[in-house]
Image (tube, helix red, strand yellow):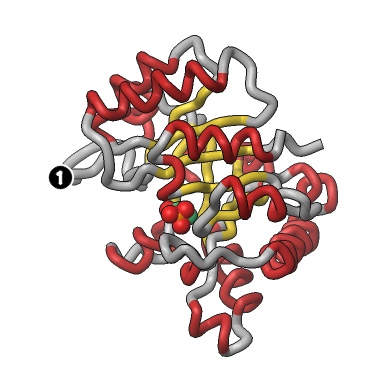
Amino acid sequence: MRKILIAGNWKMHKSIPETLELLSLLAGKVGAASPAEVVVAPPFTALSAAGKLLSGTSILLAAQNMSQNPEGAFTGEISAAMLMDAGCQWVILGHSERRSLYDETNGVICQKIKVALENGLKVIFCLGETASQRAGGKTQDVVRGQMELGLRNLDVGLLASLVIAYEPVWAIGTGKNATPHQAQEVHRFIRSELEKKYGSEFAESTRIIYGGSVTSENFQNLSLEPDIDGALVGGASLDADSFYDIITSVT
Ligand code: PEP
């Protein structure tokens, strides 16, 4: 039985006081034990304060990115150990904005995934096709390629803490979410690829979450699909009520 995971990616939003305000409201709503696993990813500057506020709650903390290097002369970068020091249990890697705006390649994403998992961080690994790739019938090829290269040479033992987020690029921040049928089709495909590579036990236990203009209204139907195990939420995670409505829409 896969536990539903609802993760909020705040992107470059919220000051430290705004972060604490939102998280206090959210923690009050979610309470000590949530049936869904709830993860929030504030900006780097607010992680440490967020980590302190969330300690003792059931809400877990994620970073939105991470260096593939452990330490050293890498100006502006943040390591896995630093994220754990700030209170993170999770990190989001391979987001389409990192791929398209900062030229993150599958190879770099793979290195980051390896370093994160080796250091004890859990990983939300994002992948998905663009509108033109979908229109050209390339969705499966793109997703397969991102999976193959992003997880290349990683030992299956390391992948127990991996969650895959299927995020069609055309649905991110656009208000155009994938239909339950479209999302389920790709989630099923991802699971079948996991099965081919790592076996059925691994494929059945790995969570595959959907991201792209999720709201409580559309997520109710998306979550009914058998291979959709949660959501990665951007815009709607910036407000305690709308994020909490998504959490409760499935529980
Ligand atoms: C995201 O940032 O991963 C995302 C899915 O954003 P939104 O929910 O705003 O489309």
Q: Is residue 240 left or right of residue 205?
A: left
Residue at position x 69%, y 55% in the image: 222
Q: Where ligand 1 lies, by image quadrant?
A: bottom left
**Picture layout, residue 50 above or below residue 203:** above
Q: Is mark 1 within 8 Å of ligand 1?
A: no
Task: Name the image quarter holding residue 177.
Answer: bottom right
Task: Name the image quarter holding residue 210.
Answer: bottom right
Instruction: Name the residue that disc number 1 marks.
Output: 75
Residue at position x 34%, y 22% in the image: 50
Q: What is the residue that sits farthest to the bottom in this orientation? A: 136
Q: Secondary structure at mark 1?
A: loop
From the image, which quarter does the C terminus lie in?
top right
Whether residue 81 can be seen here: yes
Q: How many marks?
A: 1
Q: Is residue 2 left or right of residue 72?
A: right
Task: Name the image quarter holding residue 33.
Answer: top right
Q: Is residue 69 left or right of residue 179?
A: left
Q: What percent of the width, then of the height, locates residue 39? A: 51, 33
Whether residue 152 can be seen here: no
Q: Nearer the viewer, residue 99 or 115?
A: 99
Residue at position x 45%, y 62% in the image: 172
Q: What percent of the width, then of the height, locates residue 213? A: 50, 57
Going by the numbered disc 1, the residue's amino acid type is Thr
From the image, which quarter does the N terminus lie in?
top right
Residue at position x 53%, y 36% in the image: 122
**Picture layout, residue 144 above or below residue 38:** below
Q: What percent of the width, then of the height, locates residue 186? A: 69, 67
**Picture layout, residue 142 above or below residue 229:** below
Q: What percent of the width, then of the height, locates residue 121? A: 49, 33
Q: What is the residue that sits farthest to the top in this orientation? A: 56
Neighbour class for label 1 at 10 Å: few (<14), some, many (≥20)?
few
